[in-house]
Image: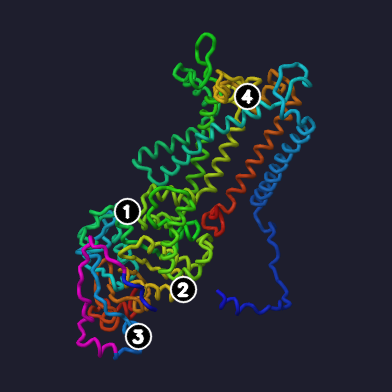
Amino acid sequence: MPAMSASVAEPAKAPALKIVRPPRETTASWPLIDRLGYLLCWAVGIGLCVIALAIVLFMFVKGVSQLRPSLFVESPAPSLHQSESGGFLDPLIGTFIVTAIGIAIAAPAGIGLAAWLTEYARPRWLARAVESGVEMIAGVPSVVLALLGLLIFARGFFAFLAGSTSAGSVTGQSFFVAGITMALLALPLVVGTTREALTQLPPRLREASYALGKTRATTIRRVLLPAVRPGMASGVVLGMGRIIGDTAIIVILMGATLKNEGVGNVPILNTLRGTGSTLTSYVYNNSPAGEGNAPQKAYAAAFVLLMIVLALNALVTRLSRGASPYTADRGTKR
Amino acid sequence: MTPPPVRRIAADRHPRVVPAPAEGGHANGATRASDTASSPTARRRAARPTTAAVERMRIESVSLAYGERWVVRDVSLTVRRGEVLALIGASGSGKTTLLRSLNRLTEVTAGAGRAGAIALDGEEIHALEVTELRRRVTMVFQQPNPFPMSIFENVAYALREAPGRGRRRARRAALEPAVREALRRAGLHDEVGEDLDRPALALSGGPQQRLCIARALAADPEVLLLDEPCSALDPISTAVIEELIVGLRESVAVVIVTHNLQQAQRVADHVAFMHLGELVEYGTAEQVFEDPRQQRTRDYIGGAFG
């Protein structure tokens, strides 16, 4: 309003004020037990920072010294000598593919589930069952999920998802199978964050839409979900991190083979139906515990893995900062 | 403020033209107006065009309950285009519930029930598709609640989704005239017309509420429900919106719930005073405020309770 701004246009001269602040609070007057507790909190906090920093530093020192550009473009090769065992191109691609499949399933399913749970949730018993189902999946160790996946996908019916042995039995190991199972891993995270964001939307937003003669479905699609876009995005990215970091499902359901081995001869589809590895299984195989035993490669790959996960974490922080749809200037312009 | 031209009335909606209600049973309207020419109410009312009011909604012996609790009992009212009906009363008097029942928004709350009949243009509102009803009877709330989208999108959302998906730019071009028209009716176009892509939440409270009114008008409703639309706004924004409300009544029937008696006096043609779920008194604004028939109304207006 121009009329308003005119009155405050006068440049105000700052008077010389002395700012008086109360003395800082000390713990001197606290009971001993509180002081000890306070100290402990400090110690734990600092300790955690040190540990986190140590991990990054350790991986950095160990990893960067082993990292060369060739590692990113060469496929792994079976060799006893580390100089001849190639790079981790295949695991890198593998990580990418599995994550893409997993998220492609988990994101729409999770967002739909979250919307149903917050906006419909009828009948009640079904909602409650779904809720505890999601919670249970979140708590199941991934190795158990992997075994379950093997139980299901090694059936003849699922031959189109994976290859078969020469004897004709379905292996139940492929990018498809691992990706689908990984979706279960990411699902609870997508559901959780989306649901949280939806429940935090003010009820008046829904009412405004209903009062304009919009159905529940239209309201969800055109108002609520766009409003929680940052929340959904964090959920998806968290889920991606979870998929990228998992090893058990890769070892059991994708074979964790040295190279990505296709099945059949349809391009792309053959890779997806075939076995392969990801960075996690590559690290495992090349660690002193694995059969490859090429620790330098393991360190280099682990460093890359860590960097990817850290980058995703940073992305989540960025997405969820100022995520409220009621902060004025966010996410409205396309 | 010059009233906007009277809008078309869809032929299939059978509006019943009733004569404008007599001025509260007072002997002579003309002498009355000159008597009170000094009060702001009278000044505005004197300038009011004497068009025939058109009945839009009829509320007949309506009682409303949440679960087992009756919050509105046996209320009968008429909502007409060409006039503003104000519902006043203390908190808990059921006026907001009554307002929300007019576009069946009470149904959002579980356990809401109704006895009696509410008709829109002669048709029971339960017989209407709820989405259609709410397009014809739109609502503005106490808190400005624009969607977290651009100003354009906020208003365009209220318009029916254009048939055929088309390209985004084509769709936008098709919707733009209607969006601008709605903004004009809400008196917001001069302020925001330059940049419709600004986020709606970047507006301050008053303009946000007018955007909500624009959104409610975009659907081209027959009845506009306002639930304490100014209670979250400063006096200047309130004055702007009150003026707007008075201007709107020529094209749309307006029902406003308000706690602010001066506001009711400024904007309303008819006033219904509710207390503990009952309709205590209904009459023209002059009659209710200057010569209330019921003791309870007199107490409330005199500030004895509430």
SS for dot 1: helix
Of the numbered discs 3 and 1, the one sitting upstream in the chain is 3
Would you name the residue on which mark 2 appears?
A: B237
Same chain? Circles 4 and 2: no
**In this picture, is B156 found above or below A221?**
below
Would you name the residue on which mark 1 appears?
A: B131
Q: Chain of mark 2?
A: B
Picture coordinates of residue A155 (x, y %)?
46, 17
Residue A113 relative to residue A49: left or right: left
Of badges 2 and 1, nearer the viewer stands 1
Name the kind of residue labelled 3 in the image. Answer: Arg
Picture coordinates of residue B40 (x, y %)?
37, 84
* B13 falls in the magenta region: yes
Residue placed at 43% from the left, 62% from the top? Answer: B177
Of the numbered discs 3 and 2, the one sitting upstream in the chain is 3
Disc 4 and disc 3 in contact, CB within 8 angstroms: no
**In this picture, is A54 found above or below B175?**
above
Residue A23 relative to residue B250: left or right: right
Picture coordinates of residue B16 (x, y %)?
20, 68
- Residue A174 seen anywhere in this rendered image of the structure: yes
Q: Which residues are magenta?
A: B7-33
Name the kind of residue labelled 2 in the image. Answer: Ser
Would you name the residue on which mark 4 appears?
A: A277
SS for dot 4: loop
Q: Chain of mark 3?
A: B
Name the kind of residue labelled 4 in the image. Answer: Ser
SS for dot 3: helix
| Alpha carbons under labels 1 and 4: distance apart | 53 Å
How many residues crowd mark 2 within 10 Å: few (<14), some (14–19), many (20+)?
A: some
Same chain? Circles 2 and 1: yes
Would you name the residue on which mark 3 appears?
A: B43
Q: Chain of mark 1?
A: B
